[in-house]
Image: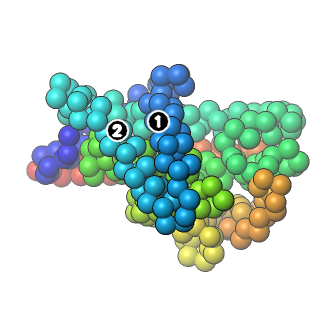
Amino acid sequence: MFWDGSRDVVTVFAVALFAVVADRLFGEPPLRWHPLVWLGNLATRVEERLCDGAESATSQRRAGVVAVLAVLLVAICPVLLLDLVLPDLLLGVLVLALALGGRSLVEHATAVSQPLEEGDLNAARGALSHIVSRDTRELDATAVSRATVESVLENGADAVFAALFWAAVFGPIGAVVYRASNTLDAMWGYRNARYAHFGWAAARLDDVLNWVPARLTAMTYTVLGSSRSAWRAWRSHRWYSGNAGAVMASGAGALGLALGGDAEYGGELKSRPRLGDGRDPTARDIGRACDLVTRGVGFWLVCLACAALGSLT
């Protein structure tokens, strides 16, 4: 289950290759059968039990830590049981394929870009509302394109590259722990009255687990796009999240676009820095962003293939 030396580099490459192919061919399972949906339901029950009973900020933080540990423990138990009956390669492919969201990312992005290119702005806004938390009802075509490109670039790091990274480092357990922590952050990592303290542990764990993958993703975007612009945007960004900022800024520069800027969340206008110094995005740039993520996955697979060949010599 845990990779334990150079002899397993070949297994790491094989797992990554077959999992990426499986994700591209089959995508995610139906929601009713998706492990992350089950995990989310579990997290909701744990939250109701622990968060509602905590009153002070300190007790809420402690409850949040316990909640994260409890959910992670439950998440890894099925993997530990399957490890008793499945070979490493099969278990690795199964878990990583479920952890990856590459095809889903492209499908959600296309659901926005297609009606946008056809001039159906309302349909594009509706599709966008399923992948971002900002208000979409009053966005114009440029703002819809910008939000979608930002989502593709950021979720490329979260739902694809980070899962590949932790699976390569720690095997199926790494992929499960990462995706579970990412799910908990998406549910609890908000700075509002309910989650400001309870969600602290989930948010910090996600930040830590994403630190290296986010910068590797930013490096990937830089290498595969307009490198000079990507590097300049990456190094000069002032985004409030270092991980997301590095990813979106490098992606903006790589694509020659201007992202970021003010956006409305929950009826309140949030001031956000600009990322990149290119032109405003259009509907066609959504496909370019998806293509950048796809080429990045290919680039990582080539790097793993080279490492596997090197381990055999």
Q: Is residue 161 visible?
A: no
Residues packed near mark 1 inside 10 Å, few (<14), some (14 to 19) or many (20 plus): some
Q: Marks 1 and 2: CB-CB under 8 Å?
A: yes
- Is residue 302 rendered to the left or right of residue 278? left
Name which residue lies at 85% across and 49% down.
Answer: 139
Dot 2: what SS? helix
**Residue type, label 1:** Leu
91 w.r.t. 175: above or below: above
256 w.r.t. 3: above or below: below
**Residue type, label 2:** Val
Q: How far is mark 1 from mark 2, CA to CA?
A: 9 Å
Name which residue lies at 62% across and 73% down.
Answer: 237
Horizontal and vertical percent for residue 32? 53, 22
Can you tell which quarter of the image residue 10 is in?
top left
Reading the image, the residue beneath label 2 is 74
Can you tell which quarter of the image residue 80 is in?
top left
Quadrant location, the N terminus: top left
- Is residue 13 rendered to the left or right of residue 261? left
Q: Earlier in the sequence, mark 1 or mark 2?
A: 1
Point out which mark residue 42 bears. Answer: 1
Residues packed near mark 2 inside 10 Å, few (<14), some (14 to 19) or many (20 plus): few
Name which residue lies at 20% across and 45% down.
Answer: 2
Q: Is residue 79 visible?
A: yes
Horizontal and vertical percent for residue 78? 30, 31
Horizontal and vertical percent for residue 128? 73, 41
- Is residue 222 rendered to the left or right of residue 139? left
